[in-house]
Image (cartoon, rainbow, N blue to C red):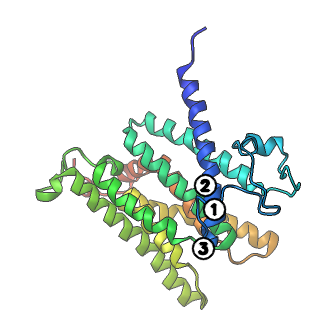
Amino acid sequence: MGIDVGMIWIVWLFALGAAIGSFLNVCIYRLPLDGSLLRPPSHCPQCKHLIRWRDNIPIVSFIILRGRCRDCRASISPRYLIVELLTATLFVLLPLVFMSRGEPLPCIIVYLALACALVVASFIDLQYTIIPNEITIPGMVVAVLASLAFPALHHLPSAGRYAHGLLANPHLNGLLHSFLGMAAGAAFILLMRVLGGLLFRKEAMGLGDVKFMGMVGGFLGWKLVTLTNFVAPVFGATVGVLLLLTKGEHKIPYGPFLSIATLAVIIFGPDMLLFIRMYYMPPYLYPG
């Protein structure tokens, strides 16, 4: 019987994603508290006992311990299992999608880093209704550097096919797309914040969301981040109406919906843009 190399890669990616998800849980817990991500070592927040290595195996340990601390039997938040499963799933799904599209390996790694930032930001926003600068500001820097190094991140024509002068250099073109994406992503949410404040007489969108979409735009470029900003309200409105009808909730964090929309656009965005180009855009806007 031959070895299924593809399945080995899937299992390895799932295990890697689960391990990284375990670290993301540390970020989710400690970043809002301004704690160090390295010290102290992982411990139970109730009894303060250090977590043994066998109790710190992603996904497996939570199931074996049935969601309770081995020492004090305090309940462990199911968020830990959810984050590890979610991250592991993304580490399998996204590479499969990208490889099917022929994306280069560096771009796949960059998108996985973005996915990790989305997970951390979303779960912090769900609990604290904030998105820390420790996620968005370094994320913007990574987006700019990645766009400069790997212009394929923005699906640019090879060798700046439609560009002239300095922008014929694909790396500078990638840098431009990153900055334009930051501006477009942040400006759209900032506009929603201003208009929402005028209409509802209260803050409709936090500055954390503005910086968050600036970061996302740095990775995706102006076209895909604009698409993301139009997709996100579909998810937000659907969940918002359900919460309003069932629990009477009027205020919900918007970060998770921005993250869901970002992931949807990362996966389906190129096809969506092609559809829009073919059926809704004048041909002269897309030469060639």
Could you tell me if residue 48 is visible in this image?
yes
Q: In the shown orientation, is residue 160 left or right of residue 82?
A: left
Tell me the residue that label 2 is attached to.
24
Taking the spot 64% from the left edge, 65% from the top edge, the residue there is: 30
Instruction: Confirm whether residue 235 shows in the render.
Output: no
Q: Position of residue 233 (x, y in %)?
A: 57, 66
Per the rendering, the mark at residue 130 is 3
- Circles 1 and 2, Cβ within 8 Å, touching? The answer is yes
First reached walking from the N terminus: tag 3 or tag 2: 2
Label 3 is placed on what type of residue?
Answer: Ile
Q: Mark 1 and mark 3: span between their CA atoms? A: 11 Å
Q: Is residue 258 left or right of residue 40?
A: left
Marks 1 and 2, how far apart at CA: 6 Å
Check disc 3 and report its element: helix, strand or loop: loop
Q: Amino acid at mark 2?
A: Leu
Query: Furthest residue to the left?
Result: 165
Q: How many marks?
A: 3
Q: Kindly report which numbered mark, 1 or 3, lies closer to the viewer in this rendering.
A: 1
